[in-house]
Image (cartoon, grey):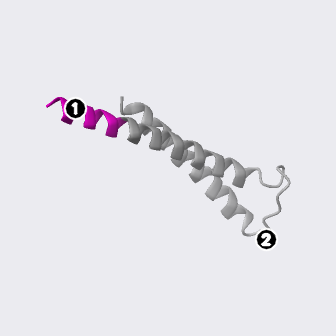
Amino acid sequence: MAVENKERSTQSLLRKIYNYTMGVLWFAVGIFFLFHRKLGYDLKFSDKDIALAYILGVSSILYGLFRLYRGFKNK
């Protein structure tokens, strides 16, 4: 019984750390795509494709926030 609880607790902690890490990474990717020109990176998007970069950036930020929320919710 105690071993199962400890194992379950360890898995929960690892899942929480994974969700926090992935949330921060996805959030950072979103920030990068939104501000890549200001950060000094030219990704050579055409004028049509720059909208795609913004869509990818916003969706990455939203997904990152979702992952952070999921890690926080699983207390």
Q: Reply above or below: 35 against 46.
A: above
For the view shown, which residue lies furthest in the front direction? 3
Q: Quadrant of residue 55?
A: bottom right
Residue 75, image x, y percentages: 36, 28
- Residue indicated by mark 2: 46
Residue bounds of the magenta highlight: 1-12
Q: Is residue 52 left or right of residue 13?
A: right
The earlier-in-sequence mark between 1 and 2 is 1
Q: Is residue 23 left or right of residue 42?
A: left
Q: Is residue 56 left or right of residue 23?
A: right
Q: Reply above or below: 55 against 23.
A: below
Tell me which residue sits at (74%, 69%) in the image.
48
Label disc, if present, on residue 5 of the rendered structure: 1
Tell me which residue sits at (18%, 29%) in the image.
2
Residue 65, image x, y percentages: 53, 41
In front here: 58 or 72? 72
Tell me which residue sits at (83%, 55%) in the image.
37
Q: Residues within 10 Å of mark 2 (few under 14, many from 20)?
A: few
Tag 2 secondary structure? loop
Tag 1 secondary structure? helix
Q: Reply above or below: 22 against 17.
A: below
Residue 10: say if magenta: yes
Tell me which residue sits at (26%, 32%) in the image.
6
Q: Is residue 28 left or right of residue 48?
A: left
Label 1 to label 2, Cα distance in Å?
54 Å
Label disc, if present, on residue 28 of the rendered structure: none
The amino acid type found where label 1 is placed reads: Asn
Q: Residues within 10 Å of mark 1 (few under 14, many from 20)?
A: few
The amino acid type found where label 2 is placed reads: Ser
For the N terminus, the image quarter is top left
In front here: 39 or 5? 5
